[in-house]
């Protein structure tokens, strides 16, 4: 996976956004509102995630794992750079950006607060204090990789990229976001492998995974049921939640954990 990271490396500053600048002026409501909110939410989420990851690097089980985890930390900062560049160069309206970031933060105070400010921060703090505690590492990987990236992240990218490609708009953002989604697929693959090994070696770790996921399911449900989003995306009611839970269940089957 580390070698794959080297081969897949891309520059957030080399993606051509010239067509996006032209497209943005013609994006109609309500797609514009949805895109602004999604972009602001992604920026807020990446900021939270990139500052709550060093503990897993410190909890590495060896040099190979440490090399890969260090590459993931670089990825998270890399993603933040791309979102910041898009908002600065394409949207280019600090007032609009600020209002939507404020709205995203307000939204994060609701269902996301339990995940980002509660579960993620507490799991990371514990891992920093106890880097050799296997339960702490399993709990963090479950929160970070299975819920944030493997359920919320994959759902957002699937439907947002589908909208952009179907309407043939914002090709630069679609390219960058697609590369980000590929990076996150590598991260999720790491965690699926790690958690599967942890559960196989210590079956009691399955209860740790199960407890964390069950505790966060109400917040996941609320996060994947945003008012009006499914109508704008042109998908059936409940499609976002169905997609996210299906992705999560597939990985839990590989790991060997039943909810």
Image (cartoon, rainbow, N blue to C red):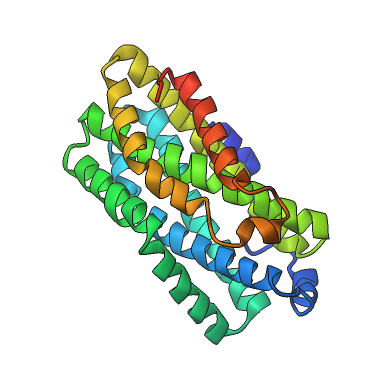
- Pinpoint residue 196: horizontal percent, then vertical percent: 41, 20
Q: Quadrant of the C terminus?
A: top left
Based on the displayed image, in which of its 4 quarters is residue 116 positioned? bottom left
Say above or below: 244 vs 196.
below
Quadrant of the drawing holding the N terminus = top right
Left or right: 140 in relation to 224: left
Left/right of residue 57 with respect to residue 84 in the rendered view: left
x 52%, y 68%: residue: 40
Residue 5 horizontal side relative to residue 170, left or right: left
Judge by depth and name the residue closer to the eye, 13 or 156.
156
Q: Is residue 138 at least partly visible in the picture? A: yes
Q: Tell me which corner region of the image, top left, top right, bottom left or bottom right, holds residue 45.
A: bottom left
Count the marks.
Answer: 0
Relative to 21, residue 83 above or below: above
Residue placed furthest toward the left: 129
Q: Is residue 2 visible?
A: no
Report which quarter residue 117 is drawn in.
Answer: bottom left
Residue at 53% in and 47% down: 153
- Residue 169 position within the rendered picture, expressed as x and y whole percent measured from the top left: 79, 64
Most foreground residue, 156 or 193? 156
x, y percent for residue 254 = 50, 20
Q: Which residue appears at 63% of the width and 82% of the height? A: 92
Q: Residue 201: x, y in percent?
A: 32, 13
Position of 24 compared to 61: left or right? right
């Amino acid at each position: 996976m580390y070698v794959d990271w080297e081969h897949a490396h891309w520059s957030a500053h080399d993606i051509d956004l010239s067509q996006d600048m032209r497209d943005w002026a013609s994006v109609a409501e309500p797609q514009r509102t949805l895109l602004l909110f999604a972009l602001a939410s992604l920026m807020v989420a990446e900021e939270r995630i990139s500052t709550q990851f060093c503990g897993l690097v410190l909890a590495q089980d060896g040099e190979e794992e440490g090399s890969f985890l260090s590459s993931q930390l670089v990825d998270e900062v890399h993603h933040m750079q791309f979102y910041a560049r898009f908002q600065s160069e394409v949207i280019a309206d600090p007032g609009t950006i600020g209002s939507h970031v404020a709205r995203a933060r307000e939204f994060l105070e609701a269902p996301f607060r339990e995940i980002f400010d509660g579960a993620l921060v507490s799991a990371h703090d514990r891992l920093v204090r106890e880097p050799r505690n296997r339960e702490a590492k399993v709990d963090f990987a479950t929160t970070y990789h299975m819920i944030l990236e493997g359920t919320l992240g994959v759902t957002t990218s699937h439907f947002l990229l589908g909208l952009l490609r179907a309407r043939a708009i914002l090709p630069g953002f679609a390219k960058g976001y697609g590369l980000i989604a590929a990076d996150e697929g590598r991260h999720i693959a790491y965690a699926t492998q790690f958690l599967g090994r942890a559960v196989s070696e210590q079956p009691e770790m399955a209860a740790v995974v199960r407890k964390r996921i069950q505790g966060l399911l109400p917040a996941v449900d609320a996060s994947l049921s945003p008012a009006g989003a499914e109508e704008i995306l042109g998908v059936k009611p409940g499609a976002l939640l169905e997609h996210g839970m299906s992705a999560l269940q597939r990985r839990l089957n590989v790991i060997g954990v039943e909810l």
